[in-house]
Amino acid sequence: MPNWQTEPPADARGVALPLRRTPANGTWAGILTSPNIIGCDTHYYGGRTQPCERPNCDACLHGIPYRWHAYVGAIDLRWAQHIILELTSQATDNLYAYLAAHGTLRGCLLECTRIGPRRNGRVATRCKPADLNGRPLPPPPDIVAALSIIWGLPRDAAQAARSPVGPTTIALNSATADLTRRPTPPHLQTNP
């Protein structure tokens, strides 16, 4: 039975936020609402980005390479809209430097510029503290729950992700992935 109301709820969208990327041949600017980065390996498969679900991942079984993507909550300054911003690993270098210097990403003014005309071209970022003039930021979004909706994952996957299995690890389905720490780039890895 519907729950009819005469006014919309304070948060009518719930955990569903739009997912944005830096536009091709353009710039995106916003203020981050997330305290930290969360990310996972993803594939471009079936015409869209979706999470890698190793060991039973269809994209992996079809030989599709994966890439690590980072996700942060942000206020889009152009549209004054709370969104989830997707970034590649290379685009997060300045965010990790900002995080190390300030202890949080929340309140960071982030500018992302897509270098070149391609939709999947490299993204350069710049970070600095935002001048909020006492304006409060909305609470950080539940990125795991929002991405679970976008990616069509079962509700229990988002719930399981809230049960920590380590200090910075979140379990999704049968795979265990470290979602808050960027992987070490291959050229910096040491072989035992």
Image (cartoon, rainbow, N blue to C red):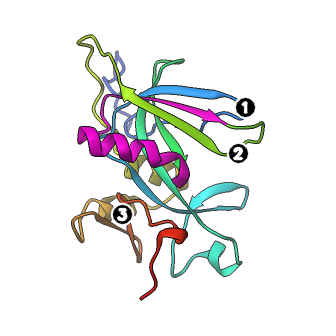
Q: Residue at x 52, y 54 (%)?
A: 89
Q: Is residue 131 above or below residue 123?
A: above
Which quarter of the picture shows residue 107?
top left
Dot 1 alpha-carbon crowd within 10 angstroms: few under 14, some 14 to 19, many 20 or more: some
Specify whether residue 99 is painted magenta: yes
Look at the numbered discs 3 and 1 and tell me whether their residues touch, using CB distance below 8 Å. Answer: no
Q: Position of residue 145 (x, y in %)?
A: 38, 50
Q: Secondary structure at mark 2?
A: loop
Dot 2 alpha-carbon crowd within 10 angstroms: few under 14, some 14 to 19, many 20 or more: some
- Of label 3 and label 1, which has the lower sequence position? 1
Q: Is residue 155 left or right of residue 35?
A: right
As drawn, the label of residue 177 is: none
As drawn, the label of residue 25 is: 1
For the record, the magenta segment spans 89-114
Q: Residue at x 54, y 80 (%)?
A: 56
Q: Amino acid at mark 2?
A: Gly
Look at the numbered discs 1 and 2 and tell me whether their residues touch, using CB distance below 8 Å. Answer: yes
As drawn, the label of residue 156 is: 3
- Of label 2 and label 3, which has the lower sequence position? 2
The N terminus appears in which quarter of the rendering?
Answer: top left
Q: CA distance from mark 1 to mark 2?
A: 9 Å
Q: Is residue 75 left or right of residue 24?
A: left
Q: Is residue 146 above or below residue 186?
A: above
